[in-house]
Image (spheres, rainbow, N blue to C red):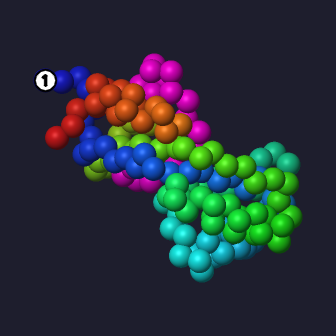
Amino acid sequence: MSSRIKIGGILKNPNLAALSVLGIADRPGIAATLLSALGRERVNVQFIVQCMDMRRQTHIVLCVDRSDLKQARALADAAAVAMGAETVDQIEEVGLVSIFGPDFRERPGIAGTMFGALADKGINILAISTSISTVACIIEGRNMNLALEALRETFELP
């Protein structure tokens, strides 16, 4: 019997770019302004994480297909001006790696195990998003194969 945690599988997308819209005064409608601008122009957002810092400034990190980066950046820049954001930043080559399975909310330690496996390989996590059945993170694109190796070594796959 394996001591590894059983998961349903691994998902990946190695062809993404990240945009960060940072330092927005927190108020209703911030996410809607940015994501509606992208949606109107048919730019598909495949990852979103938003947080608020101690100064009550909102920060949004999102990922789009690398081929959509130029258009997405122009739209994010325009939205940032309208929202009063401090800055927009980009990373041109990132990847999304996720693990999924049933009942993650009832199984403590899965996220920590995943993040530890990546750290053991020297992989820095740029952003994290979770749901009741998925733990996803954005990493530098050059680390995708190493991350997949780490996860396959760490978790029991079907």
Magenta highlight range: 112-135
- Could you tell me which residue is drawn at 18 percent across and 24 percent down? 2
Q: Quadrant of the N terminus?
A: top left
What residue is rendered at 36% in x and 27% in y?
150
> In the image, is residue 120 above or below residue 67?
above
Q: Residues within 10 Å of mark 1 (few under 14, many from 20)?
A: few
Instruction: Please state if 65 lies on the left or on the right of 151 as rendered.
Output: right
Quarter that holds the C terminus: top left
127 versus 79 height, above or below: above
Q: Residue furthest left?
A: 1
Amino acid type indicated by mark 1: Met
Q: Is residue 34 left or right of residue 42?
A: right
Q: Which residue is mark 1?
A: 1
Magenta stretch containing residue 125, yes or no?
yes
Badge 1 marks a residue whose secondary structure is loop
Q: Is residue 33 above or below residue 116?
A: below
Rendered residue at 25%/45% (across/down):
8
**Res 29 → quadrant:** bottom right
